[in-house]
Image (cartoon, rainbow, N blue to C red):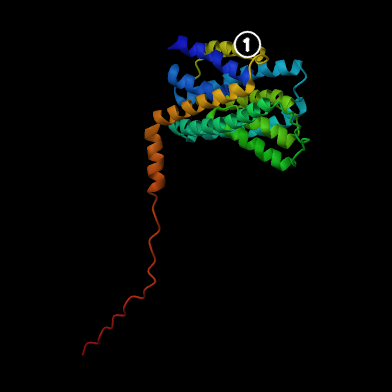
Amino acid sequence: MPILGFSLAALIGLSLGLLGGGGSILTVPILVYVLGFGAKESIAMGLAVVGVTSLFGAAGHWRRGNLQFRAALVFGAVAMAGTYAGARLSVFISGAAQLLLFAAVMLVAAFFMFRNGRKEAALAARKEAVHAPEPRKAPFPVMAAAALGVGGLTGLVGVGGGFLIVPALVLLVGLPMKQAVGTSLLVIALNSFVGFAGYLGHVEVPWVYLGVFTAIAVAGILAGTWASHFVSQAMLKRAFSAFLVLMGVFILFKNRDALAQVVHHEGHQERPAKVSLVTPPRVTVSPTR
């Protein structure tokens, strides 16, 4: 169903333009279940699509002054090391296992997005002005650990990690929220490109499909960026979180055999033999006369 798949590519761009993230969460399921590509090929292609699309989104934020290049390069450089390592490590993990991990990431993202959207809706209803505490920079080792974790996740399951990068930039790097959103798009682009490079040579990339799909997604992010000024972000986040839950459950269902094997393996691991604390009876052997 290439027409449906290419049409849904616009939804990826719209998500990135409206929410500043979520595009990579949609890309892999569309490539796997609509266009029929394998899991590893879809993860690699998804990284390229999200990388190019996020780069266009970052350019728009840069024109509005909401992009901190220094923070993006420092955080992104550490994250890229984790991304490349995760992409290389994925060679030793089955495609089904990657999809299961991907579904788990979707459900976690849905939880945080729904919680954030509910808070925004409640504050908007009360028309309260919220004054966030002044951001503070965390020690470099803490920031580096967070960046490596986000990068590793990007390489393993092909997600840009925007729902992790934005709070990390706010809480650990000390950026205001608007600048964190713009900066995260550049970090996502850098991570995605490095992750895609890590897959080259291990998967076969259909370049024509990839080019068309990416071009449509870029058009979607331009439309989403324009529409973001007229749509309630809180409502969008809650609706999108519900969609993520449905997609996550769907992926788990499609890979239920692999999930059952994981559960069966965990439940039937070898247990150490019990050690008896009772002293065995002593056997006396009478000497032969």
Q: How many labels does the image show?
A: 1
Residue tagged 1: 223
**Which structural element holds mark 1?**
helix
Quadrant the N terminus occupies? top left
Task: Identify the residue at the far front of this view.
Answer: 126
Viewer-nearest residue: 160 or 208: 160
The x and y percentages for residue 268 are: 37, 48
Question: Can residue 161 be seen from the camera position used here?
Answer: no
- Which of the 4 quarters of the picture holds residue 111? top right
Report which quarter residue 83 is drawn in.
top right
Q: Which of 98 and 201 is in front in this view?
A: 98
Residue in view at x 50 percent, y 31 percent: 102
Left or right of 124? Residue 32 is left
- Answer above or below: position of 196 versus 93: above
Circle 1 crowding by C-alpha within 10 Å: few under 14, some 14–19, many from 20: some
Q: Where is residue 49 in the image (x, y as percent from the top left)?
A: 57, 18
The three-letter code of the residue at mark 1 reads Ala
Residue at left 67%, top 30%? 166
On screen, residue 178 versus residue 31, left or right, reads: right
Note whether 8 is above or below 263 in the view shown: above
Is residue 147 visible in the rendered image? The answer is: yes
Query: x and y percent of residue 136 in the render?
Result: 77, 38
Q: Residue lying furthest left in this view?
A: 289
Quadrant placement of the C terminus? bottom left
What x and y, as percent, mark residue 129? Answer: 74, 28
Left or right, residue 166 beside residue 22: right
